[in-house]
Image (cartoon, rainbow, N blue to C red):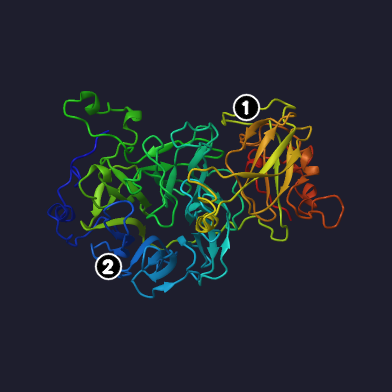
Amino acid sequence: MRHSTTHCPRDLSISLICLALVLGGPAVAEALPITRPLVFIQYSIPDDPQAVLRGNLYRLDPDGTISNLTNRNDVLVRDPEVSFDATRVVFAMRVGPDTATWQVWEIGVDGSGLRLVSRDPAYNDMDPSYLPDGRIIFTTDRLRWSDGYENVPTAQLSVMDADGTDVEVLKVNTAGHLNPVLGSNGMIYMTQWDFHDRRQEMNEEHDDLDVNRFLLWQVFADGSGLDHPAFGAHTIEDFTPGYVEVRERPNAPGTFVGTFGSGDTQELSSFSPDRLIFVPGNFHTFEGAQLVRMEPQPNQNDDTIIGLTPSVGDEECEEGDEECEEECEEGDEECEEGRGEIQGYWRSPLPLADGRIVASYTPDLLENRDGPQPFQLWIMNDDGSGQELLYADPALWSLQAVEVIARTPPTVAEGEMKPLYPYAIVNAFDVTLRENDQQPNPSPGQITEIRVLREDVRTPNTHDQQVDEGTGTGAFDPWDDPDTEVIGTAPVAADESFAVVVPIDTPLTWELLDAAGNVIVRERFGTELRAGEIRQCAGCHSPHDGTEGSTTNFALDSPTNLSGQNVDLNGNGVVDLLEGLCETMPQFCSSTIFADGFESGDVGQWNISVP
């Protein structure tokens, strides 16, 4: 794959916009190949990745007219999303110095009615998006947790009312969440960063169980149901970034486009509110990478993607290098896959209602050019073909376009959270049932107990306090893996099942132990459960289709309580959350998992509803 040396649309006459770029003058308004307005952000071009930026929210109309909606010289804007009725835009904005926090704001698509939504300037609120009832999902660093890579604050999935009140943190993953948005199925989709790095030095080889992944997950609107990635592998040897800025395709519900960072060509950018956008990408690309299409399948454990643009990091062919210059033979799909018309660095893909895609593009690495070239808005077909320059300003970056179009709100999937129960239950039917994890498949009877661990959450506040007091260099050093605290063990039943009552809203993981206490399997991806959740699976990292493994579930008859809560208030020997469960849902209890009426796939749903 080669970098194109021509940055105007190929096989097309040079447009007035492209000509303006070449001549260095302002773009001339002309009719554009879009049918509806776009709102997007434009930034002044920084000199280096650490530069203080300034930028506003803009609207681009189909006739080529450009309007500055926020129109201030002391702000930086990010993360715009349009309301379902297409009259308002919610976004994050930082006002004043670069030490100010990000806050959620709202404005009319015509630039009227600018208002502050966030109520607490002590915290960063970002990535806002509307729910049909007017509430706003977003990410916030209110917990003041920090990541294991650079020890800076991370932001967790949260929700608030339209006026900024009643803030609730929905998920508590330690490394944080990105780009939450409501899907057509009523679930909230977001990228979750899972990070565990057990190296002592950056030049050491990774432990096989290290993980550094940005995968697409989905949860119910109450934050429950985080059981398995909606897309992306979480198996061994996956210390590579992943998928960000993921959006559902309106013309193909259930499929997505996103920005993909490959571990072979990319480094990990910090998940810090002080950075421009939190995307896995090379520090010199300002988070540009490859655009891909994702088509999730049930119980999927791999990363089968469709490239819409070329992979990043490919060098331009030297003159006379025939092997490099050799074109794909006609019909060679493997060779042709991912080859768009324009090579370079892409981000912020937006699937339009008509199926086409608008995305931001820059031609080259920052470190390889004399001065930073702007991200431009380009448009392409949904398969990546027909890439054409849509809009560019030679003095500004153009990023994060969103289409101004009215949409029918989906029915929100509310979830299975039950606030009356201050605990949750994890239940697996068969600890010997594993698939595609490259860890050992335990033999029958080998696993005697599971050990449940709580991640020791780090906070930048603790770090700063220790530094200020002169008592040390901080609680955690960069790249220092979070410590874990054992909260207890639970026996594995004779049928290889286990059931544990666990704390809620707490980052947890677990290990499978043999009779000598040896760790046979370690679950590397943590999980968190909300009040009253019951997570069930056929086995740890199992096929999840309900067709294999144990046909009994003895452990659920008497779960081990590690929650620290009184789970049997009436003293009848049954966990209150499980009262009546076997009568109403016998397929999940005792020896009746595969009883009449059980359908393949039921177990894989994990979350079950208890009356």
**Position in image of residue 512 (x %, y %):** 68, 34
Displayed quadrant of residue 228? top right
Residue occupying the point 50% across, 55% down: 467
Instruction: Please say if 489 is above or below 423.
Output: above
Q: Nearer the viewer, residue 157 or 413?
A: 157
Q: Which mark is residue 440?
A: 1
The residue sitting at 51% across, 52% down in the picture is: 146
* Three-letter residue code for mark 1: Pro
Foreground residue among 158 and 268: 268
Residue 372 in sight in this render:
yes
Report whether 290 appears left or right of 470: left
Given the current orientation, which residue lies at the most extreme front position? 470
Left or right: 242 in relation to 161: left
Q: Secondary structure at mark 1?
A: loop
- Residue 482's x, y, as percent? 57, 45
Q: Between residues 388 and 282, which one lies in front from this camera angle?
A: 282
Reading the image, the residue beneath label 2 is: 67
Q: Viewed as shown, does residue 512 lie left or right of 343? A: right
Q: Residues within 10 Å of mark 2 (few under 14, many from 20)?
A: some
Pick out the residue farthest to the bottom.
113
Picture layout, residue 113 above or below residue 421: below
**Quadrant of the frame with the N terminus:** top left
Image location (x, y in percent) of residue 505: 63, 54
Q: Does any portion of residue 596 appear in the rendered image? A: no
Three-letter residue code for mark 2: Ser
Q: Earlier in the sequence, mark 1 or mark 2?
A: 2
